[in-house]
């Protein structure tokens, strides 16, 4: 968040170090080898009442539980990763070597992020996460099949060909793969699953079994039993496949029974088959300053850690600000803090605060030890990499560049200045306690190379970063977010593009962007409990109790935020800057399904032909630079058109451009799509509004005329309509003010188009008086404030709108009609499982992110909400398939598509989730 500047905000009345620890250990892991399937700167705080949430006392947030957990029905195979035995991390890993602090002079040479390894060099430090099971995983492992238990027994028994000994060299270093588990250990596990002896290696080929004492007949008897067991399992599997295929056939015909799979009407939890268990995925999140992740990416961050996902956070700058680690009002009088400006010490204090916050989220103990080491970067500098000893899946990467020190002022020595070419190189700012001792400086290209190297090292399936186009306030024209935030995000955009283009041996990845400072001007998106737990992490980071638990002279946290750990109400909210649309799953006239999401900067397509066809995909449409979020609409002739936005960089810094594009299916039902066609942008230049346009909302009215609408940088509505000759009209202004998020649109029973958009206080809308006519004028709906994401669907003769209640997460709905002008019939509160973000609705099914990050769903009015174990990127999507079937889909944190379906009946429930395609390893 950082850095020393007066906070840009709306005018009054306007729209709104390592401590001692036991000898914990870790196990190396890499994406291709698991088998889970089955500040403020000077902090010139304004004291204006509208700027800040009411401060709280330190004793108000003493939480006995560090991480809130949300339980679901145990599922066989859920997060039971191969290569990791039962039990907690330290107990399960006693044979491995502990991470300890190592001075760079004593450290072994480390390979650069994404760079070549020196020939003959010792094995490098591995900043790759390993896997200690979370509580959810441990429960799932208890319920796992016996074959998996046998595999774990084999690993525990110390088979000679398994990974048994501690070593400073990473397994697999001989072939250059960092963090790769020895293949023989995996073979032993597979042997155990197949029925081999769980307590030793398999005999050599052709060797007689060691006998004695009549063991031969007993062994034959055991093998006979094994053969019978295998035959039984095969029969059960075949029967299960037959049932699934039969269910798919019935679904396509529109006549599925109300309870596919034998469930009953009182089933509250969403059924999840063992085959639908998602890969844990690997999350890399990149932010500008220490604390940006805590303020703007939580609770997603805490959800991912709690669920056992490997998480790596990368910090671009040191966040050194003015170097004074004290609350602004106290200045140099604060005891136990840096009294005089000391930028390296303040940067170290912030790092200590981040380490404490992450340790508490992951282990419950803020003083849990970290391993700190030095890793060369692909850009020619060095990074500090911290690995949490008790949970090595949690990594922190410190790039330690200089920060701007001001939110919007012209500061050449900054990421903004480097981007614009005002400086050729940006120097490092090393914290006082870092093991990195050699200073360095990066050019613009070297920053991109460094970030691409980090991505190559960690091979993420989800990349999180800040909003690269946050916009400006309409009155002051100041940025609505810190310049380090969005210029840092632009560097990440370039790095993800380079990584996707240049690195072929990698998994697919999805991107999630987050709103920054402007959250403080929007309604609260989190319920009180979630907000309280988010604040708890900031309390830890702010070092409220001043106890030197980290053993550092620099301090154990960021005292600049200690008077206001909530910031400008930032702990009350979280908002995605992109990817909030719920229209990316659609069906065709043959009951086939199509899904469109952005992976690797390209639109990925999954397709199930007809009602019982085999899913295909993901297939990436040609064309790069696609932003998160795609929407699909069916044209009058039955073809599907896909809309989204695309970012291009150009040769000059000012050439940065975000535009609306679309691609149209070559013929109804065909797999091929035409080239991307640009609809341009209503923005005249990036400098004007930072290219701040929303994703397009698209609908086809009763005359077959498509139209696309966006919120522009001036917070109004703009739209283009396709003409009869196939061309598109100009970007027309439709008015509106204080619009936020992305608009939504649908057509009513008369074929009239209705467009709706959230403001900071309500919802406004537009309606066609008749199909083919221009939109009417903007109309206030009188609805209460929302948490921004809206979902609209034509039904009941009008257009039904769904949204969330601020400060609650409950789902609300209202029916909009256009007879005699836009009207709201009534609003209903549907309840829910708290949570935040978009909800999707089709038929009787309603689904969205629940508290805890998993997908929650309601399968009929008055029915209990269920929760699946799926954690996902962006928004869910649903569609009617045939006349009485609903299909629902998400893309998991593993960047893999998951689908389910339900009969559109009052007593129906969701079928088991099914993953589409193979596990997301290297494409």
Image (cartoon, helix red, strand yellow):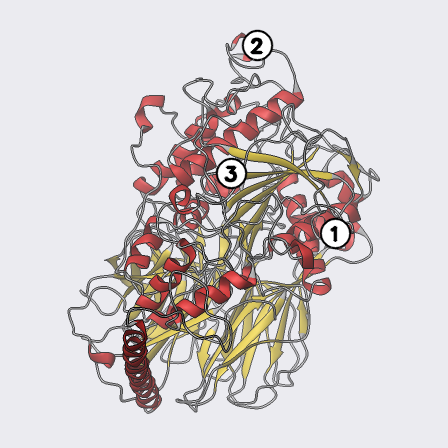
Q: Are marks 2 and 1 in contact (CB under 8 Å)?
A: no
Q: Which residue is mark 1?
A: 115
In the displayed structure, 247 sits above or below 62; it is below
Give coordinates of residue 427: x percent, y percent.
Answer: 77, 33
Element class at badge 3? loop
> Which of labels 1 and 3 is toward the front?
3
Residue sitting at x 49%, y 84%: 703
> Which of labels 3 and 2 is toward the front?
3
Element class at badge 1? loop
Q: Which residue is mark 3?
A: 98
Q: Can see residue 419? A: yes
Q: Are marks 3 and 2 in contact (CB under 8 Å)?
A: no
**Residue situated in front as seen by the camera: 26 or 266:** 26
Q: Residue furthest top?
A: 333
Q: Which residue is mark 2?
A: 332
Task: Estimate how packed mark 2 is, as few (under 14), some (14 to 19) or many (20 or more) residues with alpha carbons within 10 Å.
Answer: some
Give coordinates of residue 221: x percent, y percent.
Answer: 27, 78
**Residue situated in front as seen by the camera: 515 or 267:** 267
**Residue situated in front as seen by the camera: 107 or 12:** 107
Measure how far apart labels 1 and 3 are at the Cα level. 26 Å
Residue sitting at x 35%, y 89%: 252
Relative placement, left or right, of 455 versus 444 is left
């Amino acid at each position: 968040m950082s850095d020393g500047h007066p906070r840009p905000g709306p005018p009054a009345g306007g729209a709104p170090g390592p401590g001692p620890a036991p000898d914990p250990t870790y196990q190396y892991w890499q994406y291709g080898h698991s088998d889970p399937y089955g500040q403020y700167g000077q902090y010139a705080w304004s004291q204006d009442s509208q700027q800040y949430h009411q401060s709280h006392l330190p004793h108000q947030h003493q939480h006995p539980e560090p991480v809130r957990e949300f339980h679901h029905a145990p599922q066989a195979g859920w997060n039971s990763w191969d290569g990791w035995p039962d039990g907690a991390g330290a107990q399960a890993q006693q044979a491995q070597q502990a991470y300890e602090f190592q001075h760079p002079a004593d450290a072994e040479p480390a390979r650069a992020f994404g760079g070549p390894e020196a020939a003959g060099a010792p094995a490098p430090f591995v900043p790759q996460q390993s896997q200690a099971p979370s509580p959810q995983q441990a429960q799932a492992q208890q319920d796992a099949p016996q074959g998996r238990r046998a595999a774990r027994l084999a690993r525990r028994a110390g088979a000679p060909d398994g990974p048994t000994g501690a070593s400073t060299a990473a397994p697999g270093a001989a072939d250059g793969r960092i963090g790769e588990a020895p293949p023989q250990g995996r073979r032993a596990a597979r042997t155990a699953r197949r029925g081999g002896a769980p307590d030793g290696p398999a005999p050599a080929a052709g060797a007689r079994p060691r006998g004695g004492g009549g063991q031969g007949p007993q062994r034959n008897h055991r093998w006979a039993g094994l053969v019978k067991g295998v035959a039984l399992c095969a029969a059960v599997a075949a029967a299960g496949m037959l049932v699934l295929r039969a269910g798919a056939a019935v679904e396509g015909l529109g006549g599925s029974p109300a309870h596919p799979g034998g469930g009953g009407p009182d089933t509250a939890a969403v059924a999840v088959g063992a085959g639908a268990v998602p890969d844990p995925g690997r999350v890399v999140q990149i932010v500008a300053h220490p604390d940006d992740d805590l303020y703007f990416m939580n609770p997603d961050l805490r959800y991912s850690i709690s669920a056992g996902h490997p998480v790596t956070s990368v910090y671009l700058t040191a966040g050194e600000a003015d170097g004074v680690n004290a609350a602004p009002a106290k200045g140099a009088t604060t005891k136990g803090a840096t009294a005089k400006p000391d930028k390296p010490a303040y940067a170290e204090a912030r790092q200590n605060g981040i380490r404490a916050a992450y340790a508490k989220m992951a282990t419950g103990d803020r003083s849990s030890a970290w391993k700190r080491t030095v890793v060369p970067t692909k850009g020619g500098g060095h990074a500090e990499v911290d690995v949490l000893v008790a949970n090595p899946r949690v990594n922190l990467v410190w790039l330690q560049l200089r920060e701007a020190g001001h939110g919007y002022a012209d500061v050449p020595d900054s990421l903004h200045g480097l981007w614009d070419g005002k400086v050729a190189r940006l120097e490092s700012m090393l914290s006082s306690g870092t093991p990195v001792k050699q200073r360095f400086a990066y050019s613009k290209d070297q920053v991109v190379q460094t970030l691409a190297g980090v991505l190559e090292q960690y091979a993420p399936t989800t990349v999180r970063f800040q909003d690269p186009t946050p916009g400006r306030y309409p009155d002051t024209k100041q940025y609505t977010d810190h310049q380090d935030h969005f210029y840092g995000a632009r560097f990440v955009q370039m790095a993800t593009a380079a990584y996707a283009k240049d690195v072929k041996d990698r998994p697919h990845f999805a991107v999630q962007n987050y709103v920054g400072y402007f959250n403080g001007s929007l309604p609260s998106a989190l319920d009180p409990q979630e907000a309280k737990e988010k604040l708890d992490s900031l309390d830890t980071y702010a070092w409220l109790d001043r106890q030197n638990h980290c053993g550092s002279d620099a301090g154990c946290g960021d005292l600049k935020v200690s008077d206001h750990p909530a910031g400008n109400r930032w702990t009350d909210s979280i908002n995605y800057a992109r990817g909030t649309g719920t229209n990316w799953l659609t069906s065709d006239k043959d009951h086939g399904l199509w899904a469109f999401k952005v992976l690797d900067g390209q639109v990925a397509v999954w397709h199930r032909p007809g009602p019982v066809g085999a899913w295909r995909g993901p297939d990436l449409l040609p064309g790069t630079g696609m932003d998160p979020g795609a929407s699909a609409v069916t044209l009058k002739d039955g073809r599907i058109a896909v809309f989204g936005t695309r970012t291009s960089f150009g040769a000059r810094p000012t050439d940065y451009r975000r535009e609306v594009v679309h691609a149209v299916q070559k013929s109804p039902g065909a797999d091929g799509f035409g080239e991307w066609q640009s609809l341009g942008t209503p923005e005249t230049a990036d400098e004007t509004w930072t290219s701040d346009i929303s994703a397009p909302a698209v609908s086809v009215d009763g005359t077959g005329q498509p139209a696309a609408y966006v919120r522009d940088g001036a917070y109004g509505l703009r739209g283009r309509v396709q003409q009869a000759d196939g061309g598109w009209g100009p970007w027309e202004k439709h008015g509106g003010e204080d619009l936020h998020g992305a608009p939504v649109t649908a057509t009513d029973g008369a074929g009239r188009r209705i467009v709706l958009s959230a403001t900071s206080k309500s919802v406004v809308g537009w309606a066609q008086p008749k199909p083919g006519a221009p939109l009417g004028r903007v109309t206030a709906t009188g609805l209460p404030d929302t948490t921004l994401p809206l979902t609209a669907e034509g039904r009941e003769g009008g257009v039904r709108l769904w949204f969330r209640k601020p400060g609650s997460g409950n789902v609300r709905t209202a029916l909009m009609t256009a007879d005699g002008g836009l009207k709201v019939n009534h609003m209903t509160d549907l309840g829910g499982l708290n949570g935040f973000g978009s909800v999707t609705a089709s038929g009787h099914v309603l689904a969205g992110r629940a508290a805890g990050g998993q997908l929650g769903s309601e399968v009929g009015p008055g029915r209990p909400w269920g929760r699946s174990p799926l954690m996902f990127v962006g928004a869910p999507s649903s569609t009617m398939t045939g006349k009485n079937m609903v299909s629902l889909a998400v893309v998991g944190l593993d960047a893999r598509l998951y689908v389910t379906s339900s009969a559109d009946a009052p007593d129906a429930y969701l079928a088991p989730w099914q993953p589409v395609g193979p596990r997301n390893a290297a494409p």
